[in-house]
Image (spheres, rainbow, N blue to C red):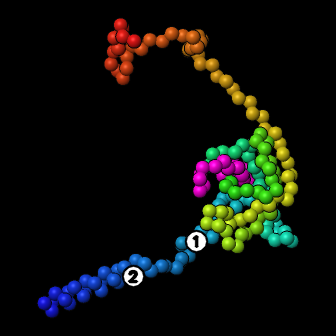
Amino acid sequence: MKKKTSWLTFTLVLASLVLLAACGGTSPTGEEQTPEATTSAAEETAVPPTTDTAGGDIITLYVGPELVDCTGVAPQQCMQVKEDPNAEYTLFYGQIDGFTFEPGYEYELQVRAESVENPPADGSSIKYTLIDVISQTPVSTTTTTMTPSVSGGGELAGTSWQLQSLQGAEVLADTE
């Protein structure tokens, strides 16, 4: 009986040590980076922001000509923005105070980016405020309508079609 109790105690102590070791945190080393330390390619190539006397950084944002579907807390429409005019657009889930988006225009905006001390769980930690609309350029939205055609030059519209085979199996001629 005493052997069983000591073996059970040893097993419980060992399991407790394993659980404590698994729950213990590690401090980041030089090889690991915390999310605050990582930088994106856009941040590396963008013009460094200047600091405004009212607080926050002054940055230039380039806004794309249309809103796109995106999903944050819920499905919504997001602006496409970039900080470098040569970079790819990224989704912008927030708002820019004082800016009203109009589809069909590309914008170059000067905005103030300020840190929010206690942001809501579903909100941004940065507040953007419009300082100036540097440019608002209309984008041509020409759509090309394609008319399907047969390789011989004939039109597909108005053509009568007859099913001859379905998934490799012949279809009877008298069935429709």
* Residue 115 in the image, given as x and y percentages of width and height: 73, 69
Q: Quadrant for the C terminus, please.
A: top left
The numbered disc on residue 34 is: 1
Q: Which quadrant would the N terminus be assigned to in this image? A: bottom left
Q: What stretch of residues is rendered in magenta?
A: 71-91
Residue shown at the point (31%, 81%) measured from the top left: 15
Q: Secondary structure at mark 1?
A: loop
91 relative to 156, above or below: below
Q: Is residue 8 above or below residue 82?
A: below
x and y percent of residue 55 in the render? 81, 71
Q: In this rendering, would 21 be left or right of 53?
A: left
Q: Residue furthest left?
A: 1
* In front: label 2 or label 1: 2
164 is higher (above) or lower (below) than 90? above
Which of pointers 2 and 1 lies earlier in the amino acid sequence? 2
Q: Nearer the viewer, residue 34 or 96?
A: 96
Mark 2 residue element:
helix
Q: Residue furthest bottom?
A: 2
Q: Amino acid at mark 1?
A: Thr
Q: Quadrant of residue 66?
A: top right
Q: Position of residue 116 (x, y in %)?
A: 71, 69
Q: Is residue 80 magenta?
A: yes
What mark, if any, has residue 20 been given in the picture?
A: 2
> Residue 79 got which mark?
none
Q: Residue at x 75, y 49 (%)?
A: 63
Residue at horizontal 82%, vertical 56%? 98
Please give the name of the residue rendered at 20% of the width and 90% of the height, measured from the top-left corner.
6
Residue 47 visible (yes or no)? no
Q: Nearer the viewer, residue 134 or 84?
A: 134
> Of the residues shown, which amino acid type is indicated by label 2?
Leu
